[in-house]
Amino acid sequence: MEGPKIKEFRVVPIAVTDPPLLNSVGVHAPYALRTIIELITNDHISGISEIPGNIEINALLEESREVILGLDPFQLNMMREKIFDRFGALETERRGDDPWDSRKLVHVYSAIEVACLDIQGKICGRPVVDLLGGRCRESVPFNAYLFYKYKGAGGALGYEVDPDATGWDSARQEAAENSEEIVVQARAMMKEFGFKAIKLKGGVFPPQEEVDAILRLRESFGPNIPLRFDPNGVWAVETAIAYGKQMEGILEYLEDPTRGQKGMSDVNRALNIPLATNMCTTSFDDIPAGVRLWSEDIILSDHHFWGGLRESVSLGKVCQTFGKGLSMHSNSHLGISLIAMVHMAAAIPNLTFDLDTHYPWQSDEVITCGRVEFEEGQVAVPREPGLGITLDHAALEKLHLNFKHCNLTSRDDTAEMKKIDPTWEFKAIRW
Ligand code: GKR
Ligand code: MG
């Protein structure tokens, strides 16, 4: 049977307002870059996806257009093979030292796969979750992802704030540079979204200050709100053990306290807290050593970094096989990524942790329904065909103009921090 064919392949870089959040490598720029992909078939069915923005990845996507055009959106294995034939040398890329994954090929696979699944779902009249094996849950829970931050709304306002903002829109602009301010941030975010678990991004201030913030959160929210903490690998093994000890019995899990599978394994043997990672075991190639060394108890998946939704479902099975937990990582993102995460999380039986999302930190949107709603910290799994969302082309154009004017081409939080403090340096291990 003649299948549909991909006739158009659009790659649109956008820049979305992002507040000055702090992390181990610096500070978020006023705009987070994303790329929106739209594939259109010969019979005018459109499929969309969203990935982290980076002009080098966009160039690869542009180059993959000629490989993908004319192919049937159901033939994902063939597409992967063709992309591999073209760019296979990139398979050996390293993820880099940043908290996020900088490998390009996984992003390309993810962009194409999610858009094709959206098309497949529209053709079959079924939601993407059904193409991944069907739903294990009706809604997907997320956690309150707290950040130390400088005062500022980001975007055009930069380090300024909008005095007319109210509720979480106002709270999101405030500084959070100590434990008290982190608790205030947590209360505002949980009031708005109803989250039932908390993650604090660390690696910013000296370890004792950040451990104190965790203790303060426990004191404020009690033992029924699970807590996680993530210093993005900038603690030495000894530091991680010493400060980790203070959080035993308190954390649901400790994420990437140090770098590398060996270091994580040493910390894991010394501490009585589950360890999680999105930095040391980050691809299927890393799994054997991750099992042998037991560097982590929980892997944080991310379909943008693991090469799509189906690969992430497979990761779920691998984790189940080896007795590891599965949770989910995020970076600044809009609703297309969020909804893709929801379909995927709904299809993985053992994805039982409340997922990470940066979504509360963003205010822009590129889908016609506007900002995605959270009910008691959860997002309902769509029932409409495909992803169940539609691209808002006017909003896309506006955010594309932001991209043209913002003078950013890839994420560089260290460069951004140097604008504030020229003496600031990236250190793989800071404490
Ligand atoms: O957004 O600054 C951030 C985070 O540090 C992010 O880039 C990380 O990739 O959230 C991520 C993590 O869990 O490591
Ligand atoms: Mg992390």
Image (cartoon, rainbow, N blue to C red):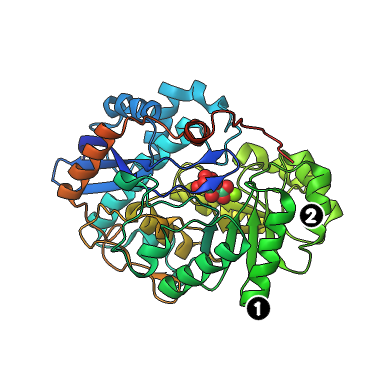
Q: Position of residue 342 (x, y in %)?
A: 42, 61
Q: Quadrant of the N terminus?
A: top left
| Residue at disc 2, secondary structure | helix
Image quadrant where residue 110 sits: top left
Q: Is any atom of residue 68 visible in this view? A: yes
Left/right of residue 366 with respect to residue 103 in the rendered view: left
Amino acid at pointer 1: Gly
Residue at 50 percent across and 24 percent down: it is: 90
Q: Give the amino acid at mark 2.
A: Tyr
Q: Position of residue 231 (x, y in %)?
A: 65, 49
The circle drawn on residue 222 is 1
Q: Residue at horizontal 36%, vertical 49%?
A: 160
Q: 82 or 379: which is nearer to us?
A: 379
For image coordinates 80% across by 43% down, the residue present is 237
Q: Residues within 10 Å of mark 1 (few under 14, many from 20)?
A: few
Q: Label 1 vs label 2: CA separation?
A: 20 Å
**Marking on residue 243:** 2
Instruction: Mark 1 or mark 2: name the one nearer the start of the chain.
Output: 1
Q: In terms of image quadrants, where is residue 234? A: top right
In the image, taking residue 20 as reference, residue 253 lies left or right, namely right
Q: Foreground: 367 or 359?
A: 359
Element at badge 1?
loop
